[in-house]
Amino acid sequence: MSPAHAATLVFAFALAAALLYYSLRGIEWRRVGRLVSGASPALLAAVAAMTMLTTFLRAWRWRVLLNAEARVGLSSAFWATAAGLFGNNFLPARAGELVRTYMISAEHDIGKAYVLATALAERVADAIVLVTIAAMVLLMIPSPPGWLESAARPFAALGLVGAGAIAILPFLGPLLERVIARAPLPPAIQTRLIATVEQGLRGLRAFHDAGRLSIFLGMALVIWALDAVGAVIGGAALGLHIPIPVAFLLIAGLGLGSALPSTPGYVGIYQFVAVSVLKPFGFRAEDALAYILVVQAIGYLVIGFWGGLGLARYRLILRSGRSG
């Protein structure tokens, strides 16, 4: 493990511990237990079905980017997406992005840098969409939570930087290649670096087609709208009424919070976001905690099942490739 990776893990666990302390202090656990034990099985099943649906749509959306240069089947994109989400839930530092990159690259013989670039650019685009949603909702709410309003600004700035990188970097390929060629590196490493940069820039260039970008953004809006509806249903399962504007704020906070260095499953970050977003709208901390625990548990079960199957399929592909 590199020093930088170790430092990131230490920071992630320290952040999780601090956020958990803030979120869990003074909690009446009996109320949390009553809310969870009294949850509606039918509505919880609906939340699980919604999680499955949005996972499928995320795979479909990613395939739009991948197919800018390849012919990736929807089933391949789905299994890789599910396995990637599985990795993000159970591995630190969003390692799931590497998991889905290796799966697609191995099955379709696409450059890893190209696949990873589409995956990371997808995350940047999601952040931009979430910031936009949060900004629109905050304009409509009379008394928005101050911390979320303040947090939206740096995320908006980062989103704009990311959008600028996606828009500009693909045009800087020749310049980057000249810089690498003049660097004091062995020729073999220079050649490899240039090929990797070229693949990565091609991945970013997938956003430069107007039709492809329109489809991607349209699907992003549908996905996050379904996530908001899922939040409303998840609240109803516990007897909580979460208005749709608050649900949008909640999913925006969870989505943006997941971009921070985190422990597996975003433990600490998700609890903090749920409590901080819901409390200003009249929910008790116990309500918010019960909600996020149930939603996380459903996510672990659904993504764990499909992601586990995706990883098993990947192992079979690797095994057949070696035997062939």
Image (cartoon, grey):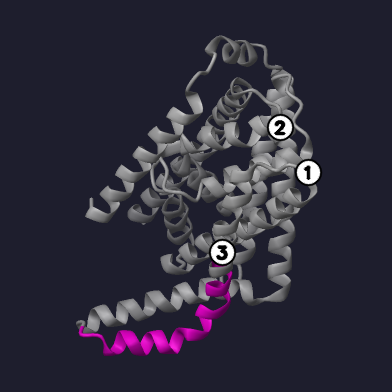
The tag on residue 142 is 1
Residue 27 picture location, percent across and down: 52, 18
Numbered disc 1: secondary structure: loop
Q: Residue at x 27, y 55 (%)?
A: 4
Q: How far apart are marks 2 and 3 (CA)?
A: 27 Å
Type of amino acid at the residue the image marks with label 2: Phe
Residue 169 magenta-highlighted: yes
Type of amino acid at the residue the image marks with label 1: Pro
Which residue was labeled with disc 3?
A: 157
Stretch in magenta? 162-184
Disc 2 packing (10 Å; few <14; some 14–19; many ≥20): some
The tag on residue 281 is 2
Disc 1 packing (10 Å; few <14; some 14–19; many ≥20): few
Quarter placement of the C terminus:
bottom left
Are circles 3 and 1 on residues that touch, CB within 8 Å? no
Q: Residue at x 29, y 52 (%)?
A: 5
Numbered disc 2: secondary structure: helix
Q: Earlier in the sequence, mark 2 or mark 3?
A: 3
Residue 283 picture location, percent across and down: 68, 26
Relative depth, front residue between 266 and 319: 266
Are circles 2 and 3 on residues that touch, CB within 8 Å? no
For residue 159, above or below residue 146: below
Residue 235 picture location, percent across and down: 71, 27
Q: Which residue is drawn at 46% across and 62% down?
A: 116
